């Protein structure tokens, strides 16, 4: 009886505005991730230039396309990202992007990044979501699918995933090297040349703030976003936190993806 009540509550209808907005933001980020990899030279450095690739075990058969084929590969991915953003054959767009991105993830682990794995998870979740049922080209083609609601589980899937990501990030920082500030000091020492903030990053007080602020943020951000009284303040802190990470560490779309997912708390 209790399980049946939980199951019923998970399928209660809620406003789908957050899901629709996230679809647009996520699609844009997918486009920028793929197109940006071409423009910044990442595709060349990772797939075109190397004569040897390091695939994950069991996926040795996955090899980059010869010549400049990977440029076309990523260009096609960027188009699929745009399809997701505008909701044009949405299911095809997000499923295709998921497959193509997963293939590139598996074929070259020398450029491993845990954010890339997280992107696969979010893509898989989005395949399951009715994110194209409002304000999309799919609705224009088929008005019958238009809806202003989605099941409540669509929201909680993303909130739970964020909780896992940030809680694990906070716990993983609870070891002597991080507490002593060694990783931050090493990283920041290599960024002294940064315009305007390079000198600031060398300050001991700032490094200490980043060390302990990172732990506190990771462990508290989701509970504070869930509490209505602290939600707006936490949103402001999150924008600053992820903006700082983007400027200093230049970690692609990840900071903006995290900011975009906050929409599920409103």
Image: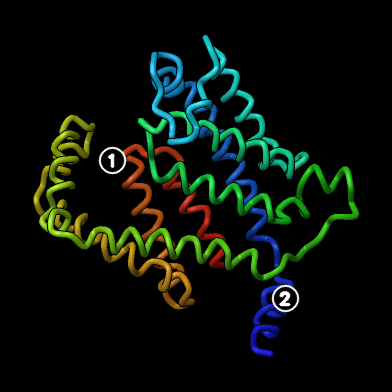
Image x and y of residue 258, in percent: 46, 53
Quarter of the picture holding the N terminus? bottom right
Please tell me the numbered disc located at residue 248.
Answer: 1
Label 1 sits on a secondary structure element that is: helix
Q: Is residue 191 visible?
A: yes
Please tell me the numbered disc located at residue 25.
Answer: none
Please tell me the numbered disc located at residue 12.
Answer: 2
Q: Earlier in the sequence, mark 2 or mark 1?
A: 2
214, 4: nearer the viewer: 4
Circle 1 residues within 10 Å: few <14, some 14–19, many ≥20? some
In three-dimensional space, the C-alpha distance between marks 2 and 1, rounded to whole angstroms, equals 42 Å
Q: Is residue 40 visible?
A: no
Left or right: where does residue 84 sit relative to residue 49? right
Image x and y of residue 54, in percent: 39, 27
Mark 2 in CB contact with mark 1 (< 8 angstroms): no
Label 2 sits on a secondary structure element that is: loop
């Amino acid at each position: 009886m209790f399980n049946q009540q939980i199951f019923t509550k998970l399928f209660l209808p809620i406003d789908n505005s957050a899901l629709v907005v996230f679809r647009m933001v996520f699609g844009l980020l997918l486009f920028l991730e793929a197109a940006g990899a071409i423009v910044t030279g990442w595709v060349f450095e990772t797939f075109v230039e190397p004569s040897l690739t390091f695939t994950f075990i069991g996926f040795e058969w996955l090899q980059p396309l010869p010549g400049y084929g990977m440029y076309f590969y990523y260009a096609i991915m960027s188009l699929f990202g745009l399809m997701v953003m505008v909701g044009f054959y949405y299911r095809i767009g997000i499923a295709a992007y998921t497959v193509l991105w997963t293939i590139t993830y598996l074929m070259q682990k020398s450029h491993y990044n845990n954010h890339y794995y997280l992107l696969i998870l979010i893509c898989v979740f989005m395949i399951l979501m009715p994110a194209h049922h409002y304000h999309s080209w799919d609705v224009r083609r088929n008005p019958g699918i238009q809806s202003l609601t989605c099941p409540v589980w669509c929201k909680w899937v993303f909130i739970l995933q964020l909780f896992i990501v940030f809680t694990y990030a906070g716990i993983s920082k609870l070891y002597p090297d991080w507490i002593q500030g060694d990783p931050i000091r090493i990283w920041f020492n290599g960024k002294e040349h940064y315009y305007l903030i390079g000198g600031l990053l060398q300050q001991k007080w700032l490094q200490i703030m980043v060390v302990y602020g990172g732990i506190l943020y990771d462990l508290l951000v989701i509970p504070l976003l869930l509490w209505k009284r602290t939600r707006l303040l936490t949103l402001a802190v999150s924008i600053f936190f992820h903006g700082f990470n983007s400027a200093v560490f230049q970690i692609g779309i990840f900071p903006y993806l995290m900011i975009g997912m906050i929409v599920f708390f409103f």
